[in-house]
Image (cartoon, rainbow, N blue to C red):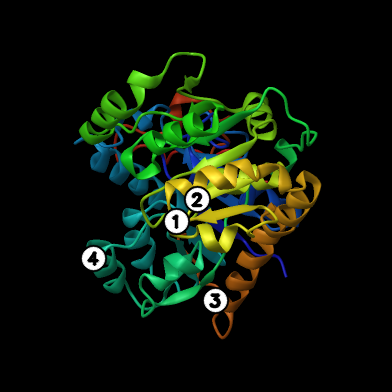
C-alpha cells in the first residue's frame, strides 16, 4: 500500500545540509528512502535544497537561530507550509520534524494520522507543552532514554535516527598519524574542554569540528575553555566540515570523543563514527549507552580517567565489525521501515482525511526560485517542486 506522506522539516538549513543540520539530514534520508520504495512524499523545507522539495523558506534562516527574530521566521515558515498543504493534499500521514510550532499546527488539523518526532531533550516546559497536545498526535522518540524522560506521554514509538551510510567509509585499522576527533557544536554541554584534556593526557592530536553555539554562554565557553588551546598543531579547530572531507576526518580518527554533560537524546556524530569503523567513546549520558556496544563499537565511561583509558584501548575495536554492526542498526532502510510501521499503525481503523482540495492551479517551481513565497495572502499560493 502506497502512502502519500507529508514530511515537514525545520526551515533553518537546506536538505541535505552542507555542514550543520542533523535534523535536516535525517529528514532527507527518510524522504529519499520512502520515495525509493514508491511512496509519494511531499517534503517541505528551505530554498537551496535538492530537487523534490516544496520550498517554503528562504535560504540563510540559520542566522536567526537563538535571536529574537527566530520565532517570527519559524511561524512564517509554518504558515506557508499550511497553505501549501491545503493545495497539495490529501495526505495519508503528516510527519512533522519542525519543533514545537510544527507539532502544534499539525495537531490542530483534525487528522488522526499525525506523527511528530522529538529531536530535543524533554524538560519541565517541554513536558507541559507535549502533554497539552491533542491526543491523536503520535509522538515519536529518537531513543529509549528520551522516551524515559516522559513515559506518560502519548508515544507512538521509538525510532533511532539514521546516518548517511553511503556517504561514509571505513579506513584501514592502522591509522597514522593518530588523532582524536570531537564533532559537535561548541558549548559546555558537548564538553570540548574535556576533550582537550583527554587528548593531552593521551599524547594525541585533537581535531575539534563544529560551529560555536550562537549564545552568550556558547561564545564565552569557547573563549575561555577552547580558544586558548587552539594552536593548529596539538589542537585544531574547524568551524565547519561536510561531505567527503567530513567522511575522511571521521574514518581516519583514532576515536570519536563525546564528553557530553547533558541527556543527549541521540548522538549523530557517535553513530557516524561507528558506521565508519571508528570507536566512539562517550560519557554515560542520554542515549549513549543504547547506541554504543561496549568493546565492540566503542566504550561508555563515567569519568575523565576512564575516557583516557578507553582511548588507549581504541585499537581493540575491529573497524570492520564495528562498521558492520552499526550499519545494520542505523541505516536509512532500517529507520524508514520503522517509520512505515508507525504510519500504518496510525492509519489503522481510520480513513485518510482529505486536507484542502486537489483542484486549482499549482505552478511547478525549480528549487531556488524567489517566487516561492507571495507577498500577500491574496497572491497565488507558493509553488512547489515536484514531490516525485
| Mark 2, residue position | 306
| Mark 4, residue position | 124
Task: Note whether 182 is above or below 124 in the view shown.
Answer: above
Task: Say which of marks 1 and 2 sits in front.
Answer: 2
Task: Note whether 78 is above or below 111 in the view shown.
Answer: above
Between the C-alphas of marks 4 and 3, the distance is 27 Å
Task: Say which of marks 1 and 4 sits in front.
Answer: 1
Question: Is disc 1 in contact with disc 2, using a CB cutoff of under 8 Å?
Answer: yes
Question: Is disc 4 in contact with disc 2, using a CB cutoff of under 8 Å?
Answer: no
Numbered tag placed on residue 346 in the rendering: 3
**Residue 3, quarter of the rendered image:** bottom right
Task: Note whether 241 is above or below 163 in the view shown.
Answer: above
Mark 1 secondary-structure assignment? loop
| Mark 1, residue position | 302
- Coordinates of residue 126 in the picture (x, y in percent): 28, 62
Q: Along the line of sight, which residue is nearer the eye, 282 or 384?
A: 282
- Coordinates of residue 348 in the picture (x, y in percent): 59, 82
Question: Is disc 4 in contact with disc 3, using a CB cutoff of under 8 Å?
Answer: no
Mark 2 secondary-structure assignment? helix
Amino acid at each position: 500500500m502506497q502512502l502519500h506522506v507529508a514530511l515537514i522539516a525545520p526551515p533553518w538549513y537546506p536538505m541535505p545540509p552542507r555542514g550543520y543540520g542533523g535534523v535536516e539530514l535525517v529528514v532527507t534520508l527518510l524522504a529519499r528512502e520512502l520515495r525509493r520504495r514508491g511512496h509519494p512524499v511531499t517534503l517541505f523545507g528551505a530554498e537551496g535544497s535538492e530537487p523534490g522539495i516544496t520550498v517554503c523558506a528562504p535560504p540563510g534562516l540559520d542566522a536567526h537561530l537563538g535571536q529574537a527574530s527566530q520565532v517570527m521566521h519559524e511561524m512564517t515558515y509554518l504558515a506557508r507550509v499550511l497553505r501549501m498543504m491545503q493545495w497539495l493534499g490529501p495526505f495519508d500521514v503528516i510527519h512533522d520534524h519542525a519543533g514545537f510550532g510544527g507539532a502544534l499546527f499539525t495537531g490542530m488539523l483534525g487528522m488522526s494520522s499525525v506523527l511528530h518526532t522529538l529531536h530535543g531533550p524533554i524538560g519541565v516546559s517541554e513536558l507541559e507543552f507535549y502533554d497539552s497536545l491533542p491526543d491523536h498526535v503520535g509522538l515519536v522518540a529518537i531513543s529509549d532514554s528520551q522516551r524515559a524522560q516522559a513515559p506518560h506521554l502519548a508515544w507512538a514509538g521509538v525510532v533511532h535516527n539514521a546516518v548517511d551510510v553511503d556517504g561514509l567509509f571505513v579506513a584501514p585499522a592502522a591509522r597514522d598519524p593518530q588523532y582524536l576527533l570531537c564533532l559537535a557544536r561548541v558549548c559546555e554541554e558537548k564538553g570540548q574542554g574535556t576533550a582537550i584534556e583527554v587528548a593531552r593526557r593521551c599524547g594525541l592530536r585533537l581535531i575539534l569540528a563544529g560551529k560555536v553555539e550562537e549564545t552568550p554562554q556558547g561564545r564565552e565557553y569557547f573563549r575561555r575553555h577552547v580558544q586558548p588551546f587552539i594552536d593548529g598543531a596539538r589542537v585544531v579547530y574547524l568551524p565547519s566540515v561536510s561531505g567527503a572531507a567530513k567522511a575522511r576526518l571521521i574514518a581516519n580518527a583514532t576515536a570519536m570523543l563525546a564528553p557530553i554533560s547533558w541527556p543527549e537524546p541521540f548522538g549523530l556524530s557517535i553513530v557516524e563514527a561507528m558506521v565508519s569503523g571508528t570507536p566512539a567513546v562517550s560519557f554515560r549520558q542520554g542515549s549513549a549507552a543504547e547506541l554504543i556496544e561496549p568493546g565492540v563499537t566503542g566504550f561508555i565511561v563515567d569519568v575523565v580517567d576512564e575516557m583516557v583509558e578507553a582511548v588507549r584501548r581504541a585499537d581493540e575495536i575491529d573497524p570492520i565489525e564495528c562498521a558492520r554492526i552499526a550499519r545494520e542498526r542505523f541505516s536509512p532502510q532500517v529507520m524508514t521501515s520503522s517509520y512505515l510501521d508507525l504510519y500504518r499503525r496510525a492509519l489503522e481503523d481510520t480513513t485518510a482525511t482529505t486536507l484542502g482540495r486537489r483542484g486549482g492551479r499549482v505552478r511547478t517551481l525549480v528549487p531556488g526560485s524567489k517566487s516561492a513565497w507571495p507577498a500577500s495572502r491574496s497572491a497565488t499560493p507558493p509553488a512547489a517542486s515536484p514531490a516525485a
